[in-house]
Amino acid sequence: MALKHNVSLATALRYKGRGPMWAFILHRLGGLGMAILLTVHILSTALGGPVGQFLNDLYMHWAFQIVVYFFVLFHAVNGLRITLLDLWPSLWVYGREALWIEWAVFLPIYGLAVYTILSTALGG
């Protein structure tokens, strides 16, 4: 029996992949976000003037830093999980457990970073 490859958007959104699906989506969004950030950063440096100043002010805003740090750190930790599981394919049986370990590593590091960003932003 062949697999059905032309899946509608509505069907795809009903997919109940749970954790691994969300890790896949966040990993892709993180990579795309970093590529866009790097491109805009290079353009803002090249352009200078009021546009460059606006983008630099945006980069320095605490809310922007928290969002960017989330995607960068998640992308790195998730990439490490995928790399380890690819190096030892027999461990893919424990893929969901590896995802829980990923979150156990990610959340404390991210929490510490958010605390540091907010304490610096609020002058503490």
Image: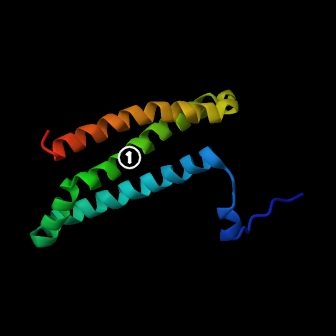
Rendered location of residue 7, percent (x, y): 72, 67
Would you call the spot at circle 1 few (<14 residues within 10 Å), some (14-19), or many (20 or more)? Answer: many
Instruction: Identify whether 28 is placed above or below 43.
Output: above
Percent across and percent down for residue 8 are 70, 71
Q: Residue at x 62, y 28 (%)?
A: 88
Residue under the image location 34 percent in, 52 percent down: 67
Give the left or right position of residue 100, taking residue 61 as reference: right
Please, is residue 99 above or below residue 70 in the view? above
Q: Residue at x 17, y 47 (%)?
A: 121
Residue 20 falls in image quadrant: top right
Looking at this view, name the residue that lies furthest to the left: 49
| Residue type for callout 1 | Phe
Which SS class for mark 1? helix
Q: Is residue 43 left or right of residue 123?
A: right
Task: Reply above or below: 46 against 102.
Answer: below
The residue closer to the viewer here, 16 or 21, is: 16
**Residue bearing the label numbered 1:** 70
Of residues 109 and 31, the one nearer the viewer is: 109
Please tell me which residue lies in front, 66 or 32. 66
In the figure, residue 98 lies in which quadrant? top right
Q: Check the picture and name the quadrant holding the C terminus.
A: top left
